[in-house]
Amino acid sequence: MKQLVNTFLAILIAAFALMYLGAWMNSNEGYSGTNTLTIYNWGDYIEPELLKEFETETGITVIYQTFDSNEAMLTKVEQGGTTFDVVIPSDYAIAKMREEKLLLPLDHSKLPNLVNIDSRFMDLSFDPGNEYSVPYFWGTVGIIYNPEMTKGMTFDSWDSLWDSRLKNNILLVDGAREVMGMALNSLHYSVNDQNEAHLQAALTKLNKLSPNVKAIVGDEIKMLLANEEAAVGIVWSGDAAEIMDENDKLDYVVPQEGSNKWFDNMVIPRTAANVDGAHQFINFMLRPDVAAKNAEYVGYSTPNVPALKLLPAEVSEDTRFYPPASLTDRLEVYDNLGKRMLAHYNELFLKFKMNK
Ligand code: SPD
């Protein structure tokens, strides 16, 4: 009997020890947390040297993964197979993640460098009070074109893209919201339109653009346009800046019918394993020298005021990439359309791609 009791006690102690070890390994401060930081960001969207600098300064090892669309990022985070500590989604995706309770509220006391962010980029509709997110880069969607190849054509209107002189000469960014938004804007509808007749009209109009579309591509759009493989591209402003850095013949314009202004912000998923490290990383990225180095390498527009002052004047004073409020005020931020409508936008975009 005594032996039976001893065995039972031994099993009980072992079970408690295993439970304690499991809890410790899953805790924010535990083995899986403090030594590593898993970051999930858009491709081509950070100066790699900064990751090394962060590792040297903090002793934390960075595991870095990339995505190429908000939709791909959302699927992965929603599935929950991988634990991410910092993710960098865009506005409407942040609103969706908030709604789905996928995000952890930020501890602003651990982010003293947040004071560096221009108030224009704080407290936006997708995250009131910046409870869950802080600004990383921002920009617009517009047309980049090669004046030599387009021979005097102007691109102040989205409609110029349908000109038959551009046959097989346009590259489109591979984004459902961007391409659908452009078609909706060309019809003078909102980039957030949910009226079915308007959406079908946008698809019909997109299908008419097909003969002019050479390809729908991801980050390689920058290399293809810089190498003059196509005359025109629909791109994010930051990509345009990077392309024009390679090939200064090109120009960038935001058409007068309107377009999208977007904001990519840093967030911490609710399932993060290293919450303290995530705050350290976000605060590091908000440092003026770090934000300036990042903006210089990536080419996108920084929301960080002192960082902007560290950039060459030809960059910080370029109104194509740092447009004044008079331009951005007439642009729209993508709304969180909800699961169904977002899937519908994706489906219409896919139909257009298959028809291409
Ligand atoms: N290669 C980096 C791309 C980042 C683009 N973010 C803009 C998203 C707009 N919805």
Image (cartoon, helix red, strand yellow):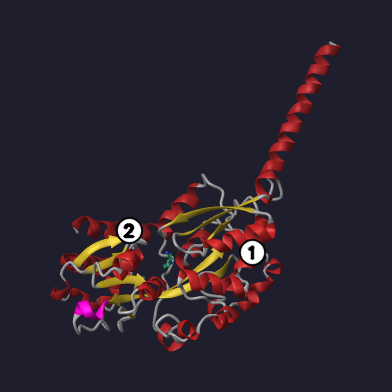
313, above or below 14, in the image: below
The image's mark for residue 106 is 1
Which segment did they paint magenta?
146-150
Q: Residue at x 78, y 19 (%)?
A: 8
**Residue 28 left/right relative to 1:** left
Q: Which of 146 and 286 is in front in this view?
A: 146
Inspect the image, locate mark 1, and give the three-letter code of the amino acid beneath it: Leu
Query: Residue 229 in the image: x percent, y percent?
Result: 24, 67
Can residue 180 be seen from the camera position used here? no
Horizontal relation, residue 76 to residue 291: left or right: left
Q: Residue 274 carries which label?
A: none
Quadrant of the rendering where the C terminus is positioned: bottom left
Instruction: Give residue 143's position: percent from left, percent from top.
Output: 30, 76
- Tell me residue 102's x, y (percent): 55, 55
**Residue 148 colored magenta?**
yes
Residue 307 visible to an observer of this rendering: yes
Disc 2 beta carbon < 8 A from ligand 1?
no
Q: Identify the residue at the far left of this view.
A: 164
Q: Nearer the viewer, residue 95 or 250?
A: 250
